Image (cartoon, grey):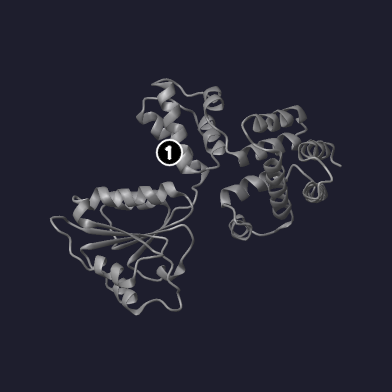
C-alpha cells in the first residue's frame, strides 16, 4: 500500500504486528515510524528499541521482539537496513513472522527492496518511494491551509517539480514558503524566488528550453547554475547522464516502472524524461550523447579546456550538430 493508505488504515484502528517501510524517500519512512510511536508508545525510553540491520544479531532482534511492554500498550522495535536472504531466511525469524508477539510492533525501514518479508500475512508493506505528483500537490495545499496560506495547484506543482518530488525537500520548502507568506497567498513568483531548484531539475529545465528552441533561456539556466557553484565538469556529467537517459527512454518500449529499475532512477524521473524526450528526434539524442562522450574524453586527455568545452557542446546541442 502507499503511505496515504497506511496512514488512513492506522487512523481507522487497523493494525499489523510488522511494518515494512521500503523506498528511497526518507520522509515517508521517518514519518511512518513516528506515527507508530505516537499511536502506540507512551514510554519510548522503556518500550522503544532501535537497531542497525548490519550489526544487530538475530538474538538481539528476537529478544527485543519478545520483550513485553512495560507500563504501556505496545513495545516497538525499529530496525534499519535489514536484508536477510530469501533462500536462507533464519528459521527463528520465520517462526516469529508466522506468529508474532501481539504486544510487540516491528518496523523494518529499508531503502532497497527485500522480498524475503513480503510473503508473510503479518507484514504490512508500505511503499515509501516518491509519491505521485497529484498526491504531493494535495499535501502541499493541505499544509498551506493549516498555516492559513493559499496556494493553487499549478503553483504547488512548481514546488514538486523543483524538488524532484522528494518529500523531505518539499516539506522544508513548503514550511519556508508558509513562514514567508504568513497567512497570505503563495504565488508562482514567490516560489521562483525562494525555492532552491534541484540541480537535476535545472538540467531538465535547460533541456526543455533547448527542445522548445528557447536558447536564450537555456543559456540563462546554465549561467545561473555556474553562479550558484556548479562546475563545468558537473554540468557536463549531468548533461551526459540526462541525455543518455532520454535516449534510453525514447528507444525503449518498457514501462516507466521497468525503466526506473533498469536505469536506477525513480519512476517520477522516468515519467518526466519520457515527456521531454518527445521534443527530440532519436537520432538527435544519439548525436548529443556521442558529442558529450567525446568531450569527456578530450577534457580528460587535456585536449580541450573544460569550461570552453562545456559551452562548445551546449551550442552544438542547440544547433543540432
Q: Secondary structure at mark 1?
A: helix
Quadrant of the image containing the N terminus: bottom left
Relative to 307, 149 lies left or right = left
Relative to 282, 241 lies left or right = left
**Among the 4 quarters of the image, the one containing residue 312:** top right
* Along the viewing direction, whichever of 129 and 300 lies nearer the viewer: 300
**Residue extending furthest left?**
71
Q: Residue at x 81, y 36 (%)?
A: 315
* Along the viewing direction, whichever of 292 and 159 lies nearer the viewer: 292
* Along the viewing direction, whichever of 2 and 260 lies nearer the viewer: 260
**Among the 4 quarters of the image, the one containing residue 138:** top left
* Along the viewing direction, whichever of 248 and 14 lies nearer the viewer: 248
Relative to 35, 254 lies left or right = right
**Among the 4 quarters of the image, the one containing residue 95:** bottom left
- Which residue is denoted by mark 1 in the rendering? 139
Relative to 202, 184 lies left or right = left
Badge 1: residue crowd in 10 Å (few <14, some 14–19, many ≥20): some
Image coordinates for residue 287, horizontal then vertical, percent:
82, 49
Q: Residue at x 14, y 58 (%)?
A: 70
Amino acid at each position: 500500500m502507499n503511505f496515504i493508505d497506511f496512514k488512513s488504515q492506522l487512523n481507522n484502528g487497523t493494525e499489523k504486528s510488522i511494518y515494512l517501510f521500503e523506498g528511497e524517500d526518507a520522509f515517508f519512512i521517518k514519518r511512518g515510524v513516528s506515527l507508530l510511536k505516537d499511536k502506540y508508545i507512551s514510554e519510548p525510553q522503556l518500550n522503544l528499541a532501535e537497531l542497525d540491520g548490519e550489526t544487530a544479531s538475530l538474538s538481539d532482534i528476537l529478544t527485543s521482539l519478545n520483550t513485553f511492554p512495560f507500563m504501556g500498550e505496545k513495545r516497538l522495535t525499529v530496525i534499519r537496513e535489514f536484508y536477510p536472504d530469501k533462500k536462507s531466511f533464519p528459521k527463528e525469524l520465520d517462526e516469529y513472522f508466522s506468529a508474532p508477539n501481539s504486544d510487540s510492533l516491528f518496523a523494518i525501514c529499508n531503502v532497497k527492496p527485500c522480498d524475503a518479508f513480503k510473503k508473510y500475512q503479518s507484514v504490512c508493506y508500505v511503499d515509501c518511494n516518491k509519491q505521485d505528483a497529484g498526491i504531493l500537490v494535495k499535501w502541499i495545499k493541505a499544509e498551506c491551509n493549516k498555516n492559513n496560506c493559499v496556494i493553487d495547484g499549478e503553483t504547488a506543482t512548481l514546488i514538486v517539480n523543483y524538488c524532484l518530488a522528494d518529500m523531505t525537500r518539499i516539506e522544508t520548502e513548503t514550511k519556508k514558503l508558509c513562514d514567508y507568506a504568513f497567512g497570505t497567498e503563495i504565488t508562482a513568483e514567490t516560489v521562483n524566488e525562494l525555492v532552491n531548484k534541484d540541480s537535476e531539475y535545472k538540467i531538465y529545465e535547460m533541456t526543455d528550453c533547448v527542445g522548445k528552441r528557447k536558447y536564450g533561456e537555456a543559456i540563462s539556466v546554465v549561467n545561473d547554475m555556474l553562479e550558484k557553484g556548479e562546475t563545468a565538469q558537473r554540468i557536463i556529467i549531468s548533461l551526459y547522464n540526462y541525455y543518455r537517459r532520454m535516449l534510453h527512454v525514447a528507444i525503449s518500449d518498457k514501462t516507466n516502472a521497468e525503466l526506473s529499475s533498469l536505469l536506477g532512477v525513480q519512476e517520477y524521473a522516468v515519467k518526466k524524461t519520457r515527456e521531454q524526450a518527445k521534443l527530440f528526434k532519436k537520432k538527435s539524442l544519439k548525436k548529443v550523447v556521442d558529442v558529450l562522450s567525446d568531450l569527456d574524453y578530450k577534457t580528460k586527455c587535456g585536449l580541450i579546456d573544460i569550461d570552453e568545452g562545456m559551452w562548445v557542446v551546449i551550442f552544438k546541442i542547440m544547433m543540432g550538430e
